[in-house]
Amino acid sequence: MIRHPAPSELLLDYASGALAEGPALLVAAHLAYSEEARADVATLEAVAGAMLESMPAESLDDDALARTLARIEAAPTPAPETWSNDDAQKIVGTDIPAPLRRYLPQDARWRSALGGIEEIELPLSDKTYRATLMRIGAGRGLPMHRHAGSEYTLVLAGGFADGHERFDRGDVCIADPAVEHKPVADADQPCICLLVTEAPVVLTGLFGRLLNPFLKR
Amino acid sequence: MSDTSQLTLPVAADDSADLIEAVARRQDRAAFAELFRRFAPRVKAFVMRSGTDADTAQEVAQETMVLVWRRAETFDRSRAGAATWIFTIARNKRVDLLRRATHAGFDAEDYVQFSTEAPESADHAAISRQMRERIGAVMQHLTADQVEVLRMAFFQDKSHSTIAEEMKLPLGTVKSRIRLALLRLREALQGDSL
């Protein structure tokens, strides 16, 4: 059972297409774990389908159908190659849903980042967000940090505790700019997450302030 | 420009699903032309509601229909109605063409591998699937406030925070309208199946 599903407003923003690429990727991956969220998105999409059906038609150019058929004749752009589930699992250390595999770069490997964590960047075309897979060692915590913008986390393996709340595989954790938090991975296994951040994270505390100049992107 | 009056007939129940299947099975051009007549003008109108100019909206409509042809084989009427399926393609095209980004899609196969949920919720989803085609009737269970939020989201391509700003409402109010709308839709869909 998913204890921390994506909130309804995030599902609506995803269903309408208004959600930016980064958080939309997180929602798409979350849907693999949560039947309830999938049912809600399908319901919202059905609402939109009904609205589309009831639209008064807008006239098209007379040759629109002919032009569309001509495009269909042209060879389709081949779909880019994506990772198989097994190959992605070998690199990442856990199985990851298909939407994430499509963003996993060909040369993906874990790289050390600050604070004893490792990360793999998932390049987005919309640069207002940054998406990374993050691995925190068993029992380790992230440095205390705050956010200049929103931060979305989806647990892919293991779990972490953040103050009073626990987050397990499939759970979504949303931290807004006002929140200062310190997630700690479970003691028995590393925690692998998808992290989507809106703007550079602001480290707090003495060590964080010293490191912060190097984190600017 | 052609006369639109012939295009405003309501789209019949789900014989559009039959047309998509005809395109998938035998690349039926007459079926595709009929789908084009039904949906391309509506997709164009839908996209124009968000303030997009007519040429760009027509481009979204044409590119949507190209994908309707190419992806017809992936259409599964047990999962979504024809209009819903075409909406999702148009939505992704709108993101693709207007924002030059990708709208990450969900893979149905993933569920088997990743889900950890109780079977009851899967039953609930099966109920919803059957009833979703009656969504228009079910929407009458929503309040005017809730419908307004959904209309702004889908017709105007606005996020819940933009909706809150424009309606001059606290963010929490918009969030609870969305949550309550979903709750009512869920209840109504389940109630209808009894």
Image (cartoon, coloured by chain):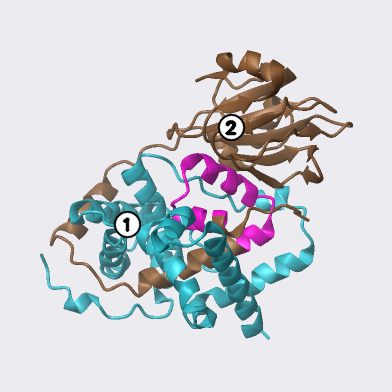
Which chain's colour is cyan?
A: B
**Number of numbered discs on residues:** 2
Instruction: Give coordinates of residue B134: x percent, y percent.
Output: 51, 80
Viewport quadrant of the C terminus of chain B: bottom right
Prevalent SS, magenta region: helix
Which residue has dot 1 on it?
A: B65
Query: Where is mark 2, residue-wise?
Result: A83
Would you identify the image quadrant in which residue B65 lies?
bottom left
For the residues marked 1 and 2, what is the alpha-carbon distance in whole angstroms? 28 Å
Q: Give the label on residue A118, or none.
A: none
Residue B115, given in percent of the width and then of the height, sits at 73, 52
Near mark 2 (Cα within 10 A), the count class, few <14, some 14-19 or many ≥20, is some
**Within the magenta stretch, is there residue B58?**
no
Q: In the figure, what tint was chain A given?
A: brown
**Chain ID for label 1?**
B
Chain to which mark 2 belongs? A
Write the start and end of the magenta stretch as one range.
A10-39
Q: Where is residue B59 in the image (x, y as percent from the top left)?
A: 24, 51
Residue type beneath disc 1: Met
- Tell me if A52 is positioned left or right of A89 in this view: left
Towards the viewer: A121 or B118: A121
Amino acid type at mark 2 = Trp
Residue in view at x 38 percent, y 52 percent:
B70
Q: What element carries label 2?
A: loop
Looking at the image, which residue is at 51% across and 53% down? Answer: A14
Q: In this view, does A43 lie above or below B161?
A: below
The reply to whether callout 1 and callout 2 are in contact (CB within 8 Å) is: no
